[in-house]
Structures are given as C-alpha cells and as structure tokens.
C-alpha cells in the first residue's frame, strides 16, 4: 500500500507593487495632516484668531494697567473758602472804644476808667515839666515811636513791654498805658506850657477786654 504525501504549501509571495504604493500613500497622508495642523495652529493670529495663551497675556496686561491708574489718583483738596470771604477768624479780643476826647490838665491827674474821665485819679498825671516837655507821673507809660498812631493791640503790647516811669513827653508825642481798671489808653500831648502849667491832651480809652 503506497502512502500519500501532500504537496508542500506554496511559499509566501513578496508584496507586490500595489501594496508598497498604498503604504507610501498612507505615510504621505499622515505627514501632510501633521504639517497642516501645525501650520494652522501657528497661523491663528494671522487669520484673526487669538490663541488661549495670547488671551491670558492680554488680560494680565490690561488688569495691571488699570490697577496702576487707579492707585495713582490723588484726592482733590479744596483750598478756597466756599463763602468767598476771609478764612481768618475775627479778633475777638479787640474791644470797642469806651471814650475819646480832649483833656486839660494843670498839674493834676485823671481817672480814665470813668466816662467822661474825672480829675483826681492817678491813671495819668501831668505834674511838672522838663524844659518844654510835660512830665508824666502816677503811672507807668510806654512812649509811642514818633509819627505812629497805634491801635488797641499795638498800644497794649507797648504798655506791657516798653513802660517807664516819669517820662518827659514833647508836643505831638503819645504814650500808651493801663488804667487802674485794666483798660488800655492812648494819650497824646497836644501842647505843654511850663509858664501856665497847662498841658492839653487827647485821650482814647478802650473798653476792658473780656479775655
């Protein structure tokens, strides 16, 4: 009995030309797709489309600029008086004039706290002369600089800081003084006559200050 031996399987055939072209076409297609994606992503700004990274950077710059402008603003300070007047408060220490007028003294003193002043007081006393000048006694007097006409504040300052006893006062000169009642007074020697002993004065007395 004879045995049957099957014929060997035919050897595998090498890939034909069509299979090679299919593989090459697939590789080319994949490369073109990758290149197209890359070019499209890079070209987004040129096409008017912003990438997420660009959007974030723009938002950061905008927020920083806004914060800088806000913090650098300075408040406006109003320096003018809204009423349009002087902002300096009035001097509440300046009193009204209590009395002003002429006095004739012939070697006697006056009480300047009374209205009108009366003889017999010691606020200002023109007893005696120094040549043509009248000598003042009975109080402390501050000689006013020649040619000046002090107001209340100036006269008060002089009577506080520049007083002297028994000054000799020429015609036309003035003195500042305090009365016994604490009032400020300004006295001007209009004329002095040693022959008759008469001294003509012009006196201004301010009311007593409340402060």
Image (cartoon, grey):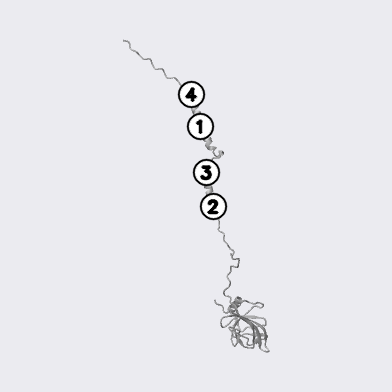
Identify residue for label 2: 68
Label 4 to label 2, Cα distance in Å?
66 Å
Label 3 to label 2, Cα distance in Å?
20 Å
Residue 197 quadrant: bottom right
The residue sitting at 52% across, 46% down in the picture is 59
Identify residue for label 4: 20
Q: Position of residue 20 (x, y in %)?
A: 48, 23
Q: Position of residue 129 (x, y in %)?
A: 65, 87
Relative to 102, is 44 above or below?
above
Number of other residues with Cα within 10 Å of mark 4, as a class: few under 14, some 14 to 19, many 20 or more: few
User: Does label 1 or label 2 sit earlier along the sequence?
Assistant: 1
Label 3 to label 4, Cα distance in Å?
47 Å
User: Does label 3 or label 1 sit earlier along the sequence?
Assistant: 1
Residue 45 quadrant: top right
Of the pair 72 and 142, the residue shown nearer to us:
72
Identify residue for label 3: 55
Of the pair 79 and 68, the residue shown nearer to us:
79
Secondary element under disc 1, as helix, strand or loop, is helix
Q: Are marks 3 and 1 in contact (CB under 8 Å)?
A: no
User: Does label 4 or label 2 sit earlier along the sequence?
Assistant: 4
Label 3 to label 1, Cα distance in Å?
27 Å
User: Does label 1 or label 4 sit earlier along the sequence?
Assistant: 4
Label 1 to label 2, Cα distance in Å?
46 Å
User: Does label 3 or label 2 sit earlier along the sequence?
Assistant: 3
Residue 191 lies left or right of residue 56; in this view the side is right
Q: Position of residue 15 (x, y in %)?
A: 46, 21
Q: Position of residue 24 (x, y in %)?
A: 49, 26
User: Does label 3 or label 4 sit earlier along the sequence?
Assistant: 4
Identify residue for label 1: 33
């Amino acid at each position: 009995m004879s045995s049957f031996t099957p014929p060997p399987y035919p050897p595998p055939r090498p890939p034909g030309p069509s299979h090679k072209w299919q593989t090459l076409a697939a590789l080319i297609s994949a490369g073109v797709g990758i290149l197209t994606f890359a070019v499209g992503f890079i070209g987004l700004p040129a096409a008017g489309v912003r990438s997420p990274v660009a959007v974030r950077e723009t938002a950061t710059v905008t927020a920083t600029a806004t914060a800088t402008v806000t913090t650098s603003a300075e408040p406006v300070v109003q320096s003018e008086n809204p009423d349009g007047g002087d902002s300096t408060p009035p001097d509440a220490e300046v009193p009204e004039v209590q009395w002003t007028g002429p006095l004739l003294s012939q070697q006697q003193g006056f009480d300047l706290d009374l209205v009108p002043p009366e003889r017999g007081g010691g606020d200002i006393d023109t007893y005696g002369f120094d040549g043509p000048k009248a000598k003042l006694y009975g109080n402390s007097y501050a000689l006013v600089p020649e040619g000046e006409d002090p107001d209340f504040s100036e006269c008060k300052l002089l009577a506080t800081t520049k007083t002297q006893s028994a000054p000799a006062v020429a015609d036309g000169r003035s003195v500042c003084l305090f009365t016994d009642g604490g009032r400020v007074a300004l006295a001007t020697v209009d004329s002095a006559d040693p022959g008759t002993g008469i001294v003509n004065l012009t006196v201004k007395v301010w009311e007593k200050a409340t402060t």
